[in-house]
Image (cartoon, coloured by chain):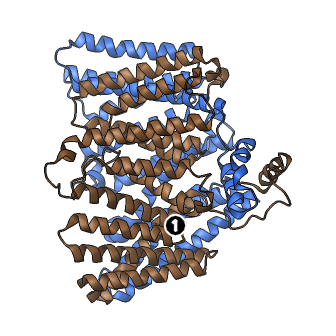
Amino acid sequence: MSSSRKQILQWAKQGYLNEASLPEALRRADAEPSSTNWRQFIDRLMLCFGALFMAAGVVFFFAYNWQEMGRYAKFGLVEFCLVVAVAICWKLGLDRLSGKVALFVSASLIGTLLALVGQTYQTGADPWQLFTIWAAMIIPWVVIGRFGALLLFWVGLVNLSMLLYFQTFPRFLGFAGVLFGSETMLWTFFLFNTLILCLWEFAAQRQVAWLCERWPLRVMAVASGSLVTVLAIWSILDFRDFGIAGPICYLAWLIVTYLVYRRRIRDLFVLAGGVLSLIIVVTTWLGRWMLFDNGSEGSFLLIGLVVIGLSAVGGMWLKTIALEETS
Amino acid sequence: MTSLSRRALWQRLQDAGLAQGELPGVGGAESPWYVRAMLGVAGWIGALFLLGFVAAGFAFVMESALAALVVGALVSGVAYLIFSRNPESDFFSQVGLAVGLAGQMMLVFGLFELFEDRESLVYTATFVIEVLLVFFMPNFIYRVLASLAGALALTFAMHSAGLYGLAPGMIAAGFALVWMQDVRWVRFGEICRPVGYGLALSMLYCKNGIFWGRWIWWTRSAGESWFSQNAPWLDKGLILLVFTLVVIALLRRMQVAVVSRSGVTVLAATAVTVAAAVFAPGLGQALLILIIGFAVCNRILIGIGLLACGGFISNYYYLLESTLLEKSLLLIGMGVLLLSARLLLRLWLPSAGAGGRADA
């Protein structure tokens, strides 16, 4: 629908179509939403937003920690919401979007319930434990849900658990770094997200229907690519502490990405991300090499020109691949 | 779009008597949005280094407002020549983008040097320059970035001039106008489309918008005035007015009478949305982007709209206008209302659930 509209508008602009007949042309080409399309859109909007607002409302409610409300009432309320959400999911079935949305809401309510336990009984548990238990508890639902967005939510929870864990124990296992600064933390995040990406792509290639949607895979590819890019940049900027594992891994990631997403799966989005990553890493390397010690105005000009050249060549290459796909 | 589907589309238009002759050639094919985004980010990086070159090699340019403005204008002129003389060249487009952005930064730097503390003058002049650049610079990515910069400059200018609460509504109106008129203004599509994207991105940012936008903290307030006292209502009112007008325009486009069953249903839903959005800042903008994105079949806008909705929830959590309890009750109420309305809609207009059992 989207590309037809763009094409028709382009033809009209080029003079191949009469501007006066454009509304009719768009209708004939199904390049404008029909009343049925609108009804479906509004129906889904109400379903997804209704569920989102309900779930967020429950989270906000318990975050407020209303003192006038007894703890049994609080537990009763969140458990009632949980049971209702699960019952709706069971009644509607997991093949329907509404059933999947209900399962998603149930999964988010588990977190609210755990937070309420911590809030009420002051268990002394660290935040990372809450998120880890939450992620562990919803694994069965992620498996039976067969819903890409829920799997992505679970991956996000695991990442958050790891982040909070590293914040709680910044020096655990002997690495020196605090918060975001640790090499081990970056490697852990990179390996976890890349592993998930590989397994997910493998399942998609095996035609596991619910894992074939591209957008969650692209989110995972962005996560993996961003982390390895950060590893490479840190290795360049802090070579003595970081060693050469980062650049080697980065080069390997770049080659594998090219081979997989150019030759086998053909995903231009990931390739475009790879090109941007390469530009950033090359710029950092040139900057470190030319500007840190005795930078001159010529260095700025040279790096600027290299960035322009790389991005122009990268853009042309990506455009060629895009044309290949449309021809 | 593949050549096969282009041919099928052309054939369909020919069968309807709307097109004659052979299938037109492919022409200059557009790159996907993420390739353009990559080029835009790379263009910014390149521009920063070019600016560094000017600052390091020609320090006098950055020390004098006049020099910065003159050199910025000259560099922008060079970018214009690069764009206009090589419209089909991807390489020169990227060169022009980096050079043009560097020129733009020098111009803005010159304005800050020239007007110093007079913020409203700085931002107004920046807005005017960005509008001129959008109009004259024949490059899609450049226009998106200049529109974004222009919309932000307008917001800051109005804020520093004491005209609080007007800019988000004006930007929303501009956004709606540009996208809702895409058929009528098809000849100006090369300007309107990038402007539309730039305004959509600026709506993610601006006041009561979505990510960081609750405070424009680097502009000074102009003191107490009618605008400062009524800004929240003015802001929401304007956006919701735009939202309502868009819904009415869409009903007219769909040839749905306002007094029909569908018309009444849609207007009732709009009234509920407007009422909810009054208490939930940012929701109006998010829904506006989403609905217009669907109306013009634009997946990028729908994506920005969904992002805005997610941003609305996270922004709403930290909003200090009301307590978490009040916010939670509003959200739960809205959720119950939406889900009940969905059920009613399926009974009232049975084809609403035309997706059937799958409803996916």
Q: Colour of chain A?
A: blue
x and y, in percent, of residue B104 in the image: 39, 74
Seen from the viewer's position, the closer of residues A276 and A234 is: A276
Residue in view at x 25 percent, y 38 percent:
B319
Query: Can residue A30 be seen at all in this image of the molecule?
Result: yes
Q: Is residue B269 above or below residue B233?
A: above
- Residue extending farthest to the left is B224
Q: Is residue A129 above or below residue A316?
A: above
Q: Colour of chain B?
A: brown
Q: Quadrant of residue B331?
A: top left
x and y, in percent, of residue B262 in the image: 58, 24
Residue neighbourhood size for the residue with mark 1, other residues' Cα within 10 Å, grouped as few (<14), some (14–19), many (≥20): many
Helix, strand or loop at label 1? It is helix
Residue that label 1 marks = B39
Query: Can residue A289 be seen at all in this image of the molecule?
Result: no
x and y, in percent, of residue A131 in the image: 34, 33
Q: Is residue B168 above or below residue A103?
A: below
Amino acid identity at mark 1: Leu
Residue in view at x 58 percent, y 15 percent:
B348
Residue in view at x 58 percent, y 70 percent:
A314
